[in-house]
Amino acid sequence: MEGEARQLVREGKITATYPERHSARVEFQDKGGLVSEELPILTTWALENKMYHMPDVGETVVCLFASNADNTGTGWIIGSRFHDKSTPNANKQDITRIDFKDGTFMQYDRAKHELRIKCVGNIYINGKNIYLNE
């Protein structure tokens, strides 16, 4: 990344999280360990439909800032990325998968129309009517 773009987009590691505000602080090693102000974490939905996820402390994230790199308070955490020590948990275009550190996962393969769920704990399903193998 070159020049001004490098000042607006930064990669760092989560140092603290604030789940109740969906925000976190990020440390930037390339800036001598500078830690950001509390930054909001972008999500896919946040109005009538909502999606919630918090990164773990130590997770590498990409941040976008509204002004130069010295201003670490006006920005957003735009997401994580895979890297050498953390590779993708699926490798096909049609798969959407979520893995949790306890071994639980959910995977949907839209080509096969197949949903797989593995849970190491209890599963609770609530609904007006629940139909199995109709």
Image (tube, rainbow, N blue to C red):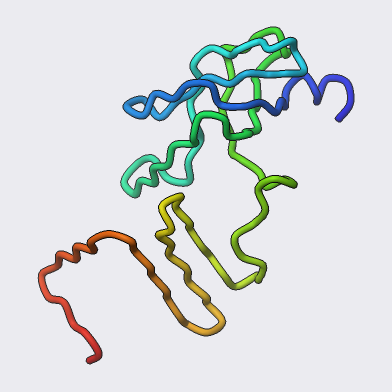
Left or right? Give the position of 76 relative to 50. right
Q: Position of residue 21 (x, y in %)?
A: 36, 25
Vertical order, 129 against 37 (above or below): below
Vertical order, 103 against 93 (above or below): above
Vertical order, 79 against 28 (above or below): below
Q: Position of residue 105 (x, y in %)?
A: 43, 62
Residue furthest toward the left?
A: 128
**The image quarter in which residue 10 lies:** top right
Residue furthest toward the right?
A: 2
Residue depicted at x 65% and y 9%: 71
Q: Position of residue 45 (x, y in %)?
A: 42, 45
The residue closer to the viewer here, 33 or 1, is 33
Q: Position of residue 117 (x, y in %)?
A: 38, 70
Quarter of the N terminus within the rendering: top right
Residue depicted at x 48% and y 25%: 40
Residue depicted at x 63% and y 34%: 60
**The image quarter in which residue 121 lies:** bottom left
Quarter of the C terminus within the rendering: bottom left
